[in-house]
Image: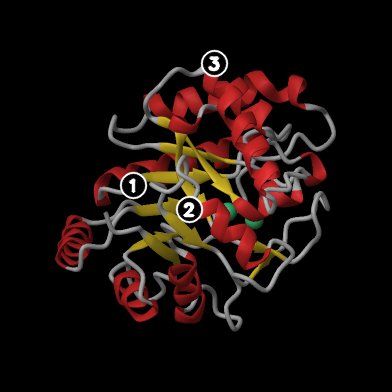
Amino acid sequence: MTRRIGGHVSCSGGLTNAVTNTLNIGGNAMQIFAGSPRMWARSLYSPELTEGFRRLTTQHDLNPVYIHALYLTNLASDNPELLEKSKTAIIMDMKNSALIGSAGVVLHIGSHQGRGWAHDRAQVISAIEQAFRETPGSSILLLENSAGQNGKIGSLKELKDILDAIPSDRLKVCLDTAHAFEAGYNFTTADGLEMWIKEIESTIGVDKVELLHLNDSKTPLGSGRDNHQNIGDGYIGDAGLSMLINHPKLAHLPLILEVPGDGTGPDRANIDRVKNLLK
Ligand SMILES: [Zn+2]
Ligand SMILES: [Zn+2]
């Protein structure tokens, strides 16, 4: 089976430009924003747009396609207006996800801003349940692990807590390698990788993991600070990333890069590096 590799690509100028951008970097999968990442406004894709995008992705065998929720959302916010805007935007992303046949919407859950997970847990769970009620059954939500900084929710224990509370096939997980490393998991050694995978198995379960965000880290192990680096140029390095993506328990997972490239995001050089790491 061909490994699925792609990058977060721009849809600027139109949804179908994401196809061109993916083909240009040599990807066979992709991640996009379904609107501006820094603006709340979202609208439903038109039937023409949806149909054109589905036709092109089928024609070029580009899949899976993921949508990344916008960066402004915080399901743990104590500001009612911000919470409402967050839910509305996520619901719109999930509706568009169903329209274009996307494999899921990747979500940074948000920050409890020091209040603690226990304090905001019920609010986050009820927001996700509402999103499922108000969107088609084919739309999937992927919770992403966090690097742990500034009260950002997304440790394996917190993800498990949410998955336990919402037993649904529509709820899955995206693991970001930079975030995990920055949160203190040293998977660059064989023992460290086994320990991380054991912890995944004893919390969320490997079968809940749908996607790997494959990023190197610009900050050291356990820094708690999220900063992505190009493949092989960061603190994780080629050997660590190679061992991880080829591990028998992870070797089926699609790889989506969110690296800086030369400043314009994931590029062909980074995709080629990943292809060279595959065994
Ligand atoms: Zn990520
Ligand atoms: Zn990140």
Q: Amino acid at mark 2?
A: Asn
For the residues marked 2 and 1, what is the alpha-carbon distance in whole angstroms? 29 Å
Q: Is residue 101 visible?
A: yes
State which quadrant residue 264 falls in. Answer: bottom right
Q: Nearer the viewer, mark 1 or mark 3?
A: 3
Q: Position of residue 127 (x, y in %)?
A: 54, 27
Is 79 placed left or right of 136 in the picture? Answer: right
Name the residue carrying label 3.
165
How many numbered marks have been drawn onto this rendered protein structure? 3
Please tell me which residue is depicted at 83% across the width and 29% down the height of the picture: 115
Q: Nearer the viewer, mark 2 or mark 3?
A: 2
Q: Quadrant of ligand 2?
A: bottom right
Q: Position of residue 45 (x, y in %)?
A: 29, 55
- State whether label 1 is within 8 Å of ligand 1: no
For the residues marked 2 and 3, what is the alpha-carbon distance in whole angstroms? 32 Å
Residue 149 position (above or below residue 260):
above
Q: Amino acid at mark 1?
A: Ser
Q: Earlier in the sequence, mark 1 or mark 3?
A: 1
Mark 3, secondary structure of its residue: helix
Residue 137 position (above or below residue 276):
above
State which quadrant residue 185 falls in. Answer: top right
Q: How is the image coloured?
A: secondary structure
Name the residue carrying label 2.
246
Is 53 placed left or right of 145 in the picture? Answer: left
Is 195 placed left or right of 91 in the picture? Answer: right
Please tell me which residue is depicted at 61% across the width and 81% down the height of the picture: 263
Query: Which residue occupies the extreme bottom position in the image?
Result: 262
Q: Amino acid at mark 3?
A: Ala
Name the residue carrying label 1.
97
Q: Marks 2 and 3: CB-CB under 8 Å?
A: no
Quarter of the image that includes the C terminus: bottom left
Q: Is residue 154 visible?
A: no
